[in-house]
């Protein structure tokens, strides 16, 4: 990477020297570049479709292909079946509770009869037609039935609590399964190949029918409506340039002819990228170059890697 950068910078310096001698009087030169985005697969499987070609202009957020999601679909069906089976594992307390409630009803009927009998004995006792022992006996029977009813009601509560506890333990497994189903849903959505940015397809790496995997590059895209000219002015020229400054960009358009564009400086490096020698004289220090980026609107003529010259 270092050698490539040095060669590019050296070539830019040579071009700048040649341009000055040929009459363009450029202050700096460099090559055009764009922000390139490599779109990768987000799912594993066979590519069912990839409807792009090199040079195709794609809008942002559009689906351009599909990876086979059948394996994910089967996994989701399995998870959904597991969720459904949880209901079959739960218990229903209603039948047992119904029996106990019927028992309470019978006990209530017994209690009502005993209370009626108690009233009759109390009336007879007032007329000296009954004894105190008879009243004590009936009161004892009433207390016994009430206690039996309390026990039966407690049994109902215990039955409901036990069944609810068991069912909650079974159904608690549903939440992680639902999360897994949601994750599979998300992965199935990612089986659709979504183009993230507007631009032109530069390189296509995959074809329909091929097997791809998550993270594997499918194509490279870049927005070519504007390009950045990476140029290399010298240290002496830095004092004459600033961010957002408008500059003139010249591009070779045949023998001794140039196309002229308006550009804007959007970035200036804060350090030198090329040092000719380890030990430098005062004159040699002026030969240090600093990278800058100039944004230029593309009319269709400009291409990535094309050389351009700058006049500040």
Image (tube, grey):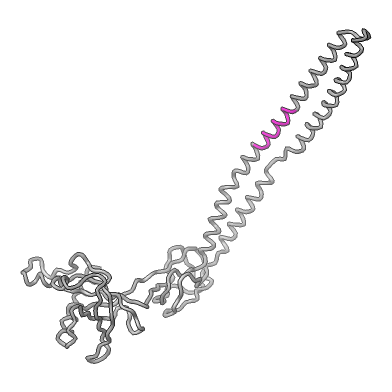
Name the dominant secondary structure of the magenta segment: helix
What residue is at 34 percent from the left and 85 percent from the top? 301
- In the picture as drawn, the residue positioned furthest to the left comes out as 281
What residue is at 55 percent from the left and 59 percent from the top? 185
Instruction: Count the marks.
Output: 0
State the quadrant of the C terminus. Answer: bottom left
Give how far across and how far down residue 173 sits, in percent: 59, 45
Give how far across and how far down residue 118 sits, in percent: 87, 17
Q: Quadrant of residue 197?
A: bottom left
What residue is at 58 percent from the left and 51 percent from the top? 178
In this picture, residue 155 sits left or right of residue 278: right
Q: Quadrant of residue 269?
A: bottom left
Is 71 contained in the magenta span? no
Give whichever of 264, 76 is nearer the camera.
264
What residue is at 24 percent from the left and 92 percent from the top? 255
Give how far across and how far down residue 85 sits, in percent: 66, 48
Residue 289 vs 26, above or below: the answer is above
State the quadrant of the N terminus. Answer: bottom left
In this picture, residue 58 sits left or right of residue 3: right
- In the picture as drawn, the residue positioned furthest to the bottom comes out as 255
In this picture, residue 16 sits left or right of residue 218: left
Residues rendered magenta in the picture: 153-164
Residue 134 vs 178, above or below: the answer is above
């Amino acid at each position: 990477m270092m050698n490539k950068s040095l060669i590019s910078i050296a070539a830019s310096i040579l071009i700048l020297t040649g341009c000055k001698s040929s009459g363009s009087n450029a202050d700096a030169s460099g090559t055009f570049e764009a922000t390139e985005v490599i779109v990768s697969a987000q799912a594993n499987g066979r590519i069912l479709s990839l409807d792009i070609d090199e040079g195709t202009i794609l809008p942002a957020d559009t689906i351009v292909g599909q990876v086979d999601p059948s394996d994910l679909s089967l996994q989701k069906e399995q998870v959904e079946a597991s969720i459904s089976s949880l209901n079959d594992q739960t218990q229903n307390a209603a039948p047992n509770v119904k029996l106990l409630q019927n028992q309470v009803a019978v006990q209530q009927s017994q209690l009502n009869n005993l209370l009626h009998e108690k009233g009759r004995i109390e009336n007879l006792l007032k007329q000296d037609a009954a004894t105190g022992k008879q009243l004590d006996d009936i009161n004892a029977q009433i207390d016994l039935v009430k206690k039996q009813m309390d026990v039966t009601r407690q049994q109902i509560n215990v039955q409901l609590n036990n069944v609810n506890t068991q069912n909650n333990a079974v159904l608690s497994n549903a939440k992680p399964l639902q999360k897994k189903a949601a994750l599979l849903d998300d992965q199935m959505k990612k089986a659709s190949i979504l183009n993230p940015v507007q631009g032109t397809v530069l390189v296509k790496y995959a074809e329909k029918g091929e097997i791809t995997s998550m993270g594997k590059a499918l194509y490279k895209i870049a927005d070519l409506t504007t390009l950045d000219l990476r140029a290399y002015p010298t240290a002496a020229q830095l004092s004459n340039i600033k961010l957002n400054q408008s500059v003139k960009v010249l591009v070779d358009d045949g023998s001794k002819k140039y196309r002229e564009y308006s550009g804007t400086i959007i970035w200036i490096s804060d350090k030198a990228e090329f040092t000719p020698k380890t030990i430098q004289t005062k004159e040699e220090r002026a030969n240090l170059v600093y990278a800058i980026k100039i944004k230029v609107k593309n009319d269709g003529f400009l291409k990535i890697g094309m050389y351009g010259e700058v006049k500040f």
